[in-house]
Image: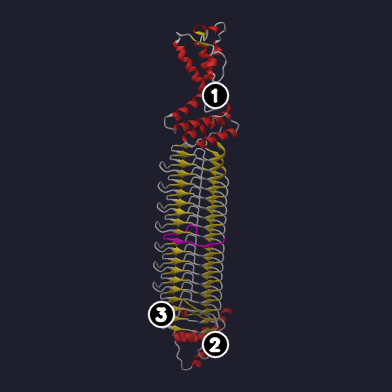
């Protein structure tokens, strides 16, 4: 029975207030709907016209009545402290509340404004609700002030919507709202919201502007749709005090976040930026924490130039699909890690002078543009840079990049056959990994500087025509090319390695090792095998004297004198190959044959002994006679005679005493040959023994 008494009491009060209002309004004629609204407002109840008046024609309120009611201008009517709460009203005439002061909450839910609605500089002290209302013509809320929340959930704006300069003390909520005007669109420029601004699942058919908007808490536009393809959406210089959410939002037209400031995170996971001509710009945007673009899709150009991300930048599995225009990250700053794992770039990419404080991760990322490729020139990474299994279809440029930690490009593929992969002047603070990497085109590591190791084990350098340049490269630790394959020329001249491992490396083209410096070098796991391989490697290289000189010095440091001699001799023989046939060539050949260029003087000794022994055989006593008859009593010794002939400048008192008999014509002629041979071989032997031949 209590509920029945409550209902009866409320109905009686409404009738009493209505009667009193009718009496006080006097001459003003109100429609039944308006009278009922007055009664409900005075009683503090919701006036749901759709329930009270099933027929639409009976739910109409005049604009003048509504204006007076909201401003408290109806004679004898004082709305309840609950405010004016109307649902289902139809307002045909234009409504104008310019500069009005409304001291209580206002609900105009599910209402239809058939003409223009003007709330220019209107001030609401409490919450306003326009949920599910429809604005058939232009709606202006320019410079409106709201003392609490403002709700436009599921509202429909068929004309222009002007929220420029509005000030909302608490939340501004337009979830599921529809802004249908395709020409003038919706304008939220310079709006100020002290709490959250929510546009979740909102649909914007026309242009929309949030330029210089100031949102103290979150900006939420998850699943929102920005459908205008020509004018798009602008968030230029917008400020968000906490997080900006655009998860799964769809932008059909150009988007502008230039100089936007987000205090904490920017979340655009799975967001789609579909405009192929103008794309989206985040140039100069500042994000106080993380920026998320995971699985985002960019159909057109994208510009992050000079943006500043205080924490992580995450674009894992993002797709940058425009094939002609650039994805620009030039001079971008990321104060923590930048993630692009499995991202796909269809067009050219620019990371020139980007600054990443910790790591840059682009594992399995695909850079597909074959003409312009991707540039990381001058990029700075404070810790590690990862490009494991990345695919580069076009040219790639790491010139002057500065990596504070390791650089890892294991199993990366550099597929462009014409244009080079450039690492010129790159600096890496730790190890650079290119294990099993594949280079289809030319490669340039000129003057690159690696503080620790350089590992290119099992890497493949497939270009047969153009040179793989490693000249003037510096490696503070070991450079490893184990089982690497070079199909074309290789340039290692003037490079500097603490250690160099070329075990089982395959060279099909020319090899240049001029002025290459190393403390340790191996070409096979075991030393004897390695030394043989190193000598063979030197033989494959273009001739430079220092190639063999360095190898000789290395063998000496290791205590392998014989191998050092082999390196020296091999170098002299390569030197002879460069000479035209002539006296110089013959002299070099003679030194090689006789004394191994001074490293094997025993060879000349063997020849000397041979000719002395030959003389002993030829100059037998029966074929000899004294020079003078007086010397006949003297004893002849064939050895001393042969030796006396052979050794120049030494008189052993044998060849001056004895001579071949007159009839020994051959011996008389051979005697001269042995003397000449002595003059040739003995000085060479002495020069080799004393080290004059080097």
Mark 2 or mark 1, which is nearer the start of the sequence? 2
Q: Which mark is residue 114?
A: 3
Q: Which mark is residue 685?
A: 1
**Residue 70 location, x and y as percent?**
50, 84
The answer to whether residue 151 is above or below residue 623 is: below
Residue that badge 2 annotates: 78
Q: CA distance from mark 2 to mark 3?
A: 27 Å
Decide if residue 18 is in sight here: yes
**Residue 257 location, x and y as percent?**
48, 66
- Disc 2 and disc 3 in contact, CB within 8 angstroms: no
Decide if residue 1 is in sight here: no
Residue span colored magenta: 292-310
Q: Indicate which label's residue lies in the foreground, 1 or 3.
A: 1
- Decide if residue 31 is on the left or right side of residue 503: left
Mark 1 residue crowding within 10 angstroms, few (<14) / some (14–19) / many (20+) = many
Q: Indicate which label's residue lies in the foreground, 2 or 3.
A: 3
């Amino acid at each position: 029975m209590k509920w029945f008494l409550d209902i009866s009491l409320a109905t009686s009060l409404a009738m009493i207030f209505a009667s009193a209002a009718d009496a006080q309004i006097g001459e003003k004629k109100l429609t039944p709907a308006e009278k009922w609204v007055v009664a409900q407002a005075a009683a503090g109840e919701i006036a749901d016209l759709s329930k009270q008046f099933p027929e639409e024609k009976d739910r109409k309120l005049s604009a003048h009545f509504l204006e007076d009611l909201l401003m408290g201008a109806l004679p004898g009517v004082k709305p309840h402290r609950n405010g004016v709460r109307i649902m289902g009203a139809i307002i045909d005439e234009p409504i104008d509340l310019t500069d009005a002061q409304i001291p209580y909450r206002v609900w105009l839910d599910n209402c239809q404004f058939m003409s223009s609605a003007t709330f220019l500089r209107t001030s609401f002290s409490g919450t306003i609700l326009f949920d599910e209302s429809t604005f058939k013509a232009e709606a202006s809320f320019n410079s409106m002030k709201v003392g609490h929340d403002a709700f436009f959930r599921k509202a429909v704006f068929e004309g222009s919507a002007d929220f420029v300069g509005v000030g909302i003390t608490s939340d501004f909520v337009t979830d599921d709202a529809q802004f249908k005007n395709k020409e003038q669109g919706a304008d939220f420029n310079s709006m100020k919201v002290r709490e959250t601004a929510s546009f979740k699942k909102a649909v914007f058919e026309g242009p929309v502007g949030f330029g210089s908007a100031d949102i103290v808490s979150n900006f939420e536009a998850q699943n929102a749709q920005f459908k205008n393809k020509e004018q798009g959406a602008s968030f230029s210089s917008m400020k968000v005090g906490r997080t900006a959410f655009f998860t799964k939002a769809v932008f059909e037209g150009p988007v502008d976040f230039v100089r936007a400031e987000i205090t904490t995170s920017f979340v655009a996971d799975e967001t789609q930026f579909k405009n192929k001509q103008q794309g989206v710009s985040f140039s100069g945007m500042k994000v106080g924490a993380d920026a998320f673009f995971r699985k985002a899709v960019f159909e057109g150009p994208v510009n992050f130039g000079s943006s500043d991300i205080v924490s992580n930048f995450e674009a894992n599995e993002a797709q940058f699909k425009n094939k002609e225009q650039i994805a620009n990250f030039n001079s971008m700053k990321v104060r923590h890690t930048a993630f692009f794992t499995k991202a796909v770039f269809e067009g050219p990419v620019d990371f020139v002078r980007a600054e990443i404080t910790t790591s840059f991760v682009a594992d399995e990322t695909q850079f597909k543009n074959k003409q312009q490729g991707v540039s990381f020139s001058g990029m700075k990474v404070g810790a590690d840079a990862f490009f494991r299994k990345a695919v580069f279809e076009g040219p790639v440029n790491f010139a002057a990049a500065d990596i504070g930690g390791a650089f890892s490009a294991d199993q990366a593929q550099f597929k462009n056959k014409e244009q080079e992969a450039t690492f010129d002047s790159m600096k890496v603070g730790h190890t650079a990994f290119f294990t099993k990497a594949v280079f289809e085109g030319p490669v340039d590591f000129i003057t690159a500087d690696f503080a620790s190791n350089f590992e290119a084990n099992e890497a493949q350098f497939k270009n047969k025509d153009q040179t793989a340049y490693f000249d003037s490269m510096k490696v503070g630790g070991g450079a490893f090319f184990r089982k690497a394959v070079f199909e074309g020329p290789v340039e290692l001249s003037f490079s500097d390695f603490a250690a160099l491992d070329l075990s089982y490396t395959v060279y099909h083209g020319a090899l240049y090792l001029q002025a290459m410096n190393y403390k340790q070098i191996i070409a096979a796991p075991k030393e004897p095998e390695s030394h043989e391989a190193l000598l063979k490697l030197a033989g494959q290289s273009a001739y430079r004297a220092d190639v063999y000189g360095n190898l000789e010095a290395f063998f000496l440091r290791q205590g392998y004198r014989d191998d050092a001699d082999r390196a020296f001799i091999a170098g002299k023989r390569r030197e002879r190959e460069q000479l035209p046939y002539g006296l110089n060539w013959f002299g070099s050949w003679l030194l090689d044959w006789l004394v191994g260029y001074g490293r094997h003087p025993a060879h000349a000794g063997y020849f000397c002994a041979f000719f002395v022994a030959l003389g002993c055989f030829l100059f037998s006593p029966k074929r000899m006679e004294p020079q003078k008859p007086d010397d006949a009593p003297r004893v002849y010794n064939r050895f001393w005679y042969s030796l006396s002939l052979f050794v120049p400048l030494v008189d052993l008192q044998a060849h001056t005493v004895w001579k071949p008999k007159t009839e020994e014509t051959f011996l008389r002629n051979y005697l001269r040959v042995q003397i000449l041979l002595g003059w040739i071989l003995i000085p060479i032997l002495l020069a080799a023994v004393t080290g004059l031949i080097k």
